[in-house]
Amino acid sequence: MSLKQHLAIASLLVCGVQFNFADTIQLKDKDAVTGKILAEKPDAVVVDVGYTVLIVPRNVITRIVKANETNTPVVAPLTDNGQFYSASTKPFAARDVSSLVKQIGESVVQVRTPEGLGSGFFINPDGYLITNFHVIEGETEISVEVYRQADGNLNREIYKQVKIIAINKFHDLALLQIQDKNAPKFKPVLLGDSDALNVGDSVFAIGSPLGLERTVTQGILSTKTRQLEGELYLQTSAQINPGNSGGPLFNLAGEVVGVTNMKITFGEGLGFAIPVELVKSFLDHRDAFAYSTDNPNNPYRYLEPPSRTKSKPTDK
């Protein structure tokens, strides 16, 4: 039996099953599977449809609609290829930096808090963006400044309804989402492959060092495996300064290969970036790093302990 036939039968049988809090998986052929999502994996989603459990491949899914505690659908948007983000799968052809900056300029943003300024970049058209954890650490009032192309110019738009979706303070990563009403679709970047980089490859960064917005710096990859405090970083000669934090480090195809996050204070051309492979892992397992308002600095979601069986009073 084909996958489509199997899902079609499942959809028919589910009509007779009642779900108080139903999740819906919408498929490319306009069919849908309704049930309770048990697990979300990089290549598939596991859903309980009442009488059996289905494994639905990601490449046939167009959207996942989850039901929250009040039974209001919560949409987990996907890109056109059925993934939460887009990643390169082919070797890239180098291009000049000036044309790349024009192409990806709308994807890089400023992240502002009452205490400071950082950078970030969109990974999803629905307003999901990556920045550093230390940019938003301890903050709940966050705004994002987006620059849109119009008549050859970049016009600033400020969004103040920004939600923290997930955080990983150990890898210094945060996933945010712009939730302003009537916000348009945003232009995401393509995530590259930091493992495919070679020492000496040209890279460039876009950010707002010291508040100087839309600053582009270019350099080379100095090393791929610089160990600092037990973590491995990409080291680059591209200038990185406060305000660059959370911004993208690009290869010459305009693909993100790292997230800039620090520099050596007493030195020049000694910048560091988090490898994009760690970013992909963070996004693939974002549910495990879901932000909790009960403990804003906790990057993990702990399961509730099993309830203890209460003993009934004995009759006398």
Image: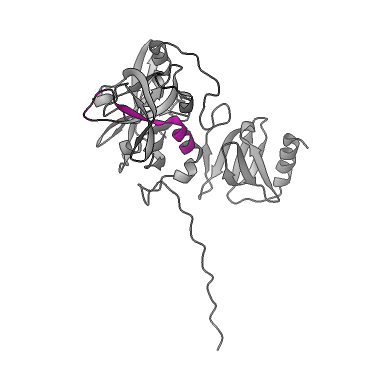
Q: Is residue 59 left or right of residue 289?
A: right
Q: Residue furthest right?
A: 1
Q: Is residue 127 magenta?
A: no
Q: Quick one: quadrant of the C terminus? A: bottom right
Whether 12 is drawn above or below 268: the answer is: below
Task: Write the residue at 66% across / 42% down.
Answer: 55
Instruction: Give whichever of 298, 182 is nearer the camera.
Output: 298
Q: Is residue 108 left or right of residue 283?
A: left
Residue 83: x and y in percent read 55, 31
Q: Residue furthest left?
A: 266
Q: Is residue 277 magenta?
A: yes
Whether 97 is drawn above or below 107: the answer is: above
Task: Write the residue at 35% across / 47% down.
Answer: 297
Q: Quick one: quadrant of the N terminus? A: top right
Q: Is residue 254 left or right of residue 264?
A: right
Residue 49: x and y in percent read 67, 47
> Start and end of the magenta stretch?
265-282
Task: Write the residue at 43% across / 20% down.
Answer: 251
Asked which quadrant contains residue 243, the reply is top left
